[in-house]
Amino acid sequence: MSSELTFCKMLLDRASHLRKNTAWLADKILANESCFYFYWQNKFLYLEQEIFVYHQNENSVSNDVLSISDISQSDKLTFLGLEGDTAHFVFDLSEFGEAALEQWLLGIGHNKVQRTAKFIDFRRSLSLLSSAQASILSYAKALIHWQQSAVYCGSCGNKTQPLDGGHRMQCLSDKCQKEQFPRTDPVVIMLVEYQPEVGPAMCLLAEHHRISEQVYSTLAGFVDPGESLTEAVSREVFEEVGITVTEISYVDSQPWPFPNSLMLGFIARATSTEINLEEEELRSADWFTAEQLANFYEWGDDVEGAKLPRKESIARLLIDSWCEKQRRS
Ligand SMILES: [Zn+2]
């Protein structure tokens, strides 16, 4: 399936073989064309409505504020990858308190272009980003989230240090030296369909407590240890709505950096229709035809009535492609 999903347009070569080479990385940090993004507590730095990408060869920001020699000494700099020969990095300022950050932002704002520098929540800023930028920043956000959770060794409790441009954390205890690598949590997300003997096919959608009321989305859940993806699909559907499924097939996947999931999209065929709702997670669940879904409102519409999930989500892709298939059949 050709994917138009948000966070699925990565232009960078992750260059995993090169990031282990510290001399190469040091050269890239100092290279004039290298790109630097700035992160602070789930937010990225913008100038007005544009993501701020710092290049050393553009003299728009004073070197007192952004000293690459300072940044290069910091363990808060992460190498993201290469766009051609141009290296992309993200710098994490999350340790700054509000006051220190305010001072730093004033320095950025007081530059020749006289534009307002501010940090904007990543999720809220998606509409300001191209799909390629959204993919790079979602990758950056997921990596930093992992690094922040790995600053101590899970084995002996000592501090760790980032290596390989921020892609490996190693325990500083000589006895231990345990390594940690970035984590991705697999989540299965599935559209359950049912074809009655008479009448149009239906799909099962639910209102989840964790999203707004009247938004009907597909079922989803984390994969358990020791479980295959199809087992996870069957288990989650049965746990959430008491329905058994068969003919489970993979559709597409999407990295979801809130905070570090990989959504694995499936379609499955129900062998029963009676819903037994798991009320802790779901507000309601029901069967809908493609014709009914065509009359749903959009996510975020300020109206009373059933709405579809966000357009950038894999839930929406599963619903839209199922509806398209019904229209064609
Ligand atoms: Zn350790």
Image (cartoon, helix red, strand yellow):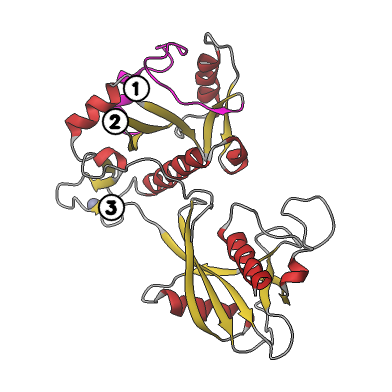
Q: Quadrant of the C terminus?
A: bottom right
User: Does the Cβ of the disc 1 residue fall within 8 Å of ligand 1?
Assistant: no
Q: Is residue 301 magenta?
A: no
Dot 1: what SS? loop
Give the CA distance from mark 2 to mark 1.
Answer: 9 Å
Where 189 sits versus 165, above or below? below
Q: Mark 2, mark 3: which one is toward the viewer?
A: 2
The residue at 52%/10% (across/down) is: 111
Residue neighbourhood size for the residue with mark 2, other residues' Cα within 10 Å, grouped as few (<14), some (14–19), many (≥20): few
Magenta stretch, residue numbers: 49-76
| Residue, disc 3 | 180
Tally the marks.
3
| Residue, disc 1 | 33
Q: Is residue 24 left or right of residue 299?
A: left
Dot 3: what SS? strand
| Residue, disc 2 | 85
Question: In the rendering, at what x and y percent does residue 235 appear?
Answer: 51, 80
User: Does the Cβ of the disc 2 residue fall within 8 Å of ligand 1?
Assistant: no
Q: Quadrant of residue 76?
A: top left
Q: Is residue 159 left or right of residue 261?
A: left
Q: Quadrant of residue 88?
A: top left
Q: Amino acid at mark 1?
A: Glu
Q: Amino acid at mark 2?
A: Asp
